[in-house]
Image (cartoon, grey):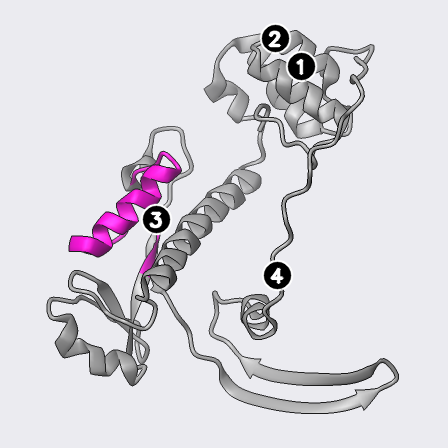
Amino acid sequence: LLGRPIPGSDDPQQLGGRKAYDMNDLSRAMKLWPRHSGMERRVLHRLIKTGKPKHAIREIDWRIQKLWVSALQSKVCNDIIAQRVQRGWIDKLVDGDFAMKHENGAGFLVEDAAKEQPRCEAYEISPTAPMVGYRVTLPQGEPLKMEEEAFAAVNLKPGDFRREGGERAKGTRRFARVKPSNLELAGGVDEHGAYVEVKFDLPAGSFATVLLGELMKVPRKAPMEAEEAPEPEESDDSSED
């Protein structure tokens, strides 16, 4: 929240505040963080006053904390699904997978992937990925190794989500793939030119923007280039009410 500068995203004042925080110069960081960064300034002020990170964290609204935990769970889940795509496992079951039935969401451990694969190809069942939490069901074998590597990449373990004083999250598993229904395709021309119209339904928890991105193959934007930023000015007020 307060450190790790993000060139090309942070404005010069924020960059200066982050750099000062990473150098453990908290007073200068407070002077540099802009007034419109109210949450960051409140957290930093409490950290300066108490010297205790757990007290500073309490300055963050619990709804924001909950949102951040959910975002982290989603990132890890997406990273694991991306790994399955790269390995050719998105439409394929592997021994040790935890699969679920599309009909009712019932889950089971895949002991014989070759035996269950026809049901996967018929879209009766699919492999899953974790929304990590302290009670999430984990797979076995190679799928477990892949998931543990994704957890380690963000310095997490499932048990961390019940840590004392932290945001508790039980976790769950989600389908690694979903199938659009009620699909309709049409084309036409309007005042802007030719267009293609796509209509479909998706189950809860999946996103139309992802499906459209795959259809259109829109390239991801490259990270913003770091720009030479002027030296930030310190504010006159280093305190926070």
Marks 2 and 1 in Cβ contact (< 8 Å): yes
Query: Quick check: 177 left or right of 13?
Result: left
Residue 94 numbered mark, or none: none
Sequence-first tag of 4 and 1: 1
Q: Considering only vertical position in the picture, is 181 above or below 214?
A: below
Q: Position of residue 11 (x, y in %)?
A: 75, 30
Residue at the image point whose x is 70% and y is 36% from the top: 8
Which amino acid does the dot numbered 3 rest on? Val
Identify the amino acid type marked 1: Ala
Q: Position of residue 68 (x, y in %)?
A: 51, 42
The N terminus sits in image quarter: top right
Q: Nearer the viewer, residue 4 or 40?
A: 4
Residue occupying the point 80% across, 89% down: 189
Kind of residue sitting beneath label 2: Asp
Relative image position of residue 47 (x, y in whole percent): 56, 14
Q: How far apart are marks 3 and 4 (CA)?
A: 29 Å
Marks 3/2: CA distance? Answer: 35 Å
Q: Name the residue under label 1.
A: 29
Is the C-beta separation of discs 3 and 4 under 8 Å?
Answer: no
Q: For the magenta stretch, what is the residue range?
A: 129-157
Residue placed under numbered mark 3 in the picture: 132
Residue 163 seen from this side = yes
CA distance for labels 4 and 2: 40 Å
- Residue that carries the numbered disc 2 in the rendered image: 25
In the rendered image, which residue does mark 4 sit on?
A: 219
